[in-house]
Image (tube, rainbow, N blue to C red):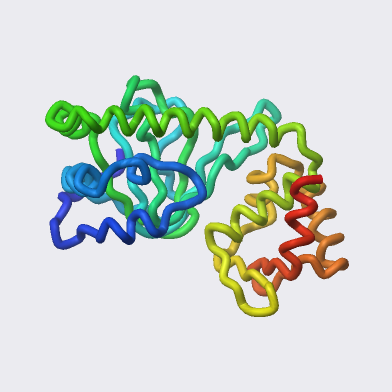
Amino acid sequence: MIPKSGYRFSEKIMLSSILGQQMARDTLFSVLPPVLAEGLIAQASTVELAPDQTLFRCGDACDGCYHVVDGLLKVTVDLPSRRERILAILGAGGFLGELSLMDGAPRSATVTAIKRAKLYFISRAAFDAFGAANPEIYRHIADLLARRLRDNSATLAMSSLSINARAARALLSLAAAFGKDVGAGRILIRQKVSQGDLAAMAGIARENLSRILQDWMEEKLISRLAGYYCLERKDALERAADA
């Protein structure tokens, strides 16, 4: 069990920062009015993870949810082939395990820190007490569930895409989360991502991803320096993502 230190009010981050740094997926805080989001985070304690430390594993009991304050984590499942599939990479603003609060079901994925991370932990007991005092929160959670259903439909559709399209979408999703325009339409992904992790994000074999990336480098669609990818021609990758 990861130790949880007491939450200090002075550590509270501004809600505008929480909402402004959201990853490209809907979270509990993204659908809550500010007063509810602030009230909920006031119930939190602090968790810190070292690189490669696991927060929880698939099948673990749900004891609460987590909000990422700083750092980077990956959400993974093991495929029947024993390969790892990355479902999401979460930075500041990411949320983990909020839907399990509703039914108490075991964790459906494993979450591991890619780099040192700080999170706020909201226990299931604290959430239940907050919900009893603020029942309107459940209306917003219903909205979140509807959005997740739409996201699941998009995920299922991705399984029918070509491996090139999957690779392009993985790079574009990283660019959306960590990209910086460095001029002339070039987008630098300001986060080192291994080829294995990128392949796991795309759901393709590493050797296939390596071949695709090599082709794109030769065509000058992307470049890589010191472990950082740069999208040289984002428009071409967007076309590849829809092919």
Residue 221 place in picture, x, y as percent: 79, 66
Q: Nearer the viewer, residue 210 or 159?
A: 159
Q: Is residue 152 above or below residue 111?
A: above
Residue 115 place in picture, x, y as percent: 46, 59
Q: Residue at x 22, y 30 (%)?
A: 136
Q: Residue at x 74, y 41 (%)?
A: 204
The answer to whether residue 157 is left or right of residue 151 is: right
Work out whether residue 178 can be spotted.
yes
Q: Quadrant of the N terminus?
A: top left
Q: Residue at x 64, y 69 (%)?
A: 187
The answer to whether residue 13 is left or right of residue 91 is: left
The answer to whether residue 79 is left or right of residue 137 is: right
Q: Residue at x 79, y 54 (%)?
A: 210
Q: Is residue 144 above or below residue 239?
A: above
Residue 165 place in picture, x, y as percent: 77, 46
Q: Quadrant of the C terminus?
A: top right
Residue 76 place in picture, x, y as percent: 54, 39
Q: Nearer the viewer, residue 70 or 26?
A: 26
Splitting the image into 4 quarters, where does residue 143 fall?
top left
